[in-house]
Amino acid sequence: MTEMKKILEVDLYEPIQKHFLKQGFTVNGEVHDCDLTAVKDHELVIVELKLNLNIELLLQATRRQRLTEAVYIAIPKPKRMSKKRWNDVIALVKKLELGLITVSFTAKRRTLDFVVHPEPFDRKKSTGENRRKKSKLLKEIEGRSADYNTGGNSKSKIMTAYKENCIQIACYLEKEGPMSAKTLRELGTGDKTSSILYNNFYKWFERIQRGVYSLSDQGKLELAEYPALVEYYLERLASKSSDDSVQ
């Protein structure tokens, strides 16, 4: 079996050069710091070559956009990259209005793939396609009572709207004793109350009879870890009880 030699940046040049020559372009390497230039009928294409897609390559390519709109970056086709990561890379390249060429190397062949062509980025279209994700983000923000997380600290436990909802239910069960999902909803625990009690993700709840739940020993123990939220929800419960008594 023939062992593949180490790939160098110069190995990217020849297959891309051949492609543009076949398209009728005049191709040159290393012109005023541009790795590859291709010219045809006053159309100028610039390709920057790198073994890895990194910030330096992107900076280099965006500098070339001062000279022409047709700027590509070219890299060896990644062998180990998750689909999500690769999709993020493609999205970034599109936002920068660059083109992306990958080169596959085998013992006998060099294969080009024009993954992205340089074209204007439609921000409105991109935002519209991600409307569902934006709606989900805003819903999560609205479901949080305050900011209990420190940005950038992803290794610690994150307080989510779902967990807050669980804490609210646990607070009310500890304060008022066993209740049904309907009674809890009437106290303001929201539409997800039934599914939270049924799924019992944190093992905080116990069903003591059909439709009636109490707080488990584990729930009592772990609820003590959130004193600020416990205080907040007990104040809400007291305010709700006060309003009901006035009515």
Image: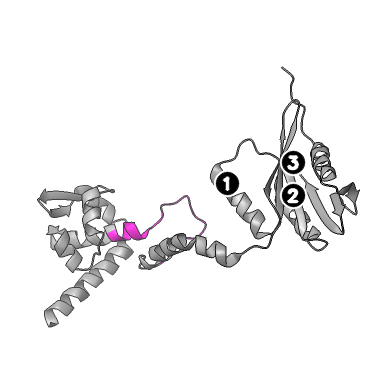
* Quadrant of the rendered image containing residue 164: bottom left
Crowd tier of the residue under label 2, counting other residues whose Cα lies within 10 Å: few below 14, some 14–19, many 20 or above = many
Please report whichever mark, 2 or 1, sits nearer to the chain's N-terminal start: 2
Q: Nearer the viewer, mark 3 or mark 2?
A: 2
Query: In the image, what residue occupies the spot 47% across and 49% down?
Result: 155
Question: Where's residue 124, x and y in %?
Answer: 56, 67
Location of residue 115 with respect to 42 vertically, above or below: above
Between the C-alphas of marks 3 and 2, the distance is 10 Å
Q: CA distance from mark 2 to mark 1?
A: 17 Å
Q: Which residues are magenta?
A: 147-165
User: What's the image's color scheme?
Assistant: one colour
Q: Which residue is mark 1?
A: 85
Instruction: Tell me the element at label 3.
Output: loop
- Vertical relation: 60 (above or below) 51: below
Indicate left or right for 192 with 8 as reference.
left
| Disc 3 from disc 1: Cα separation | 17 Å
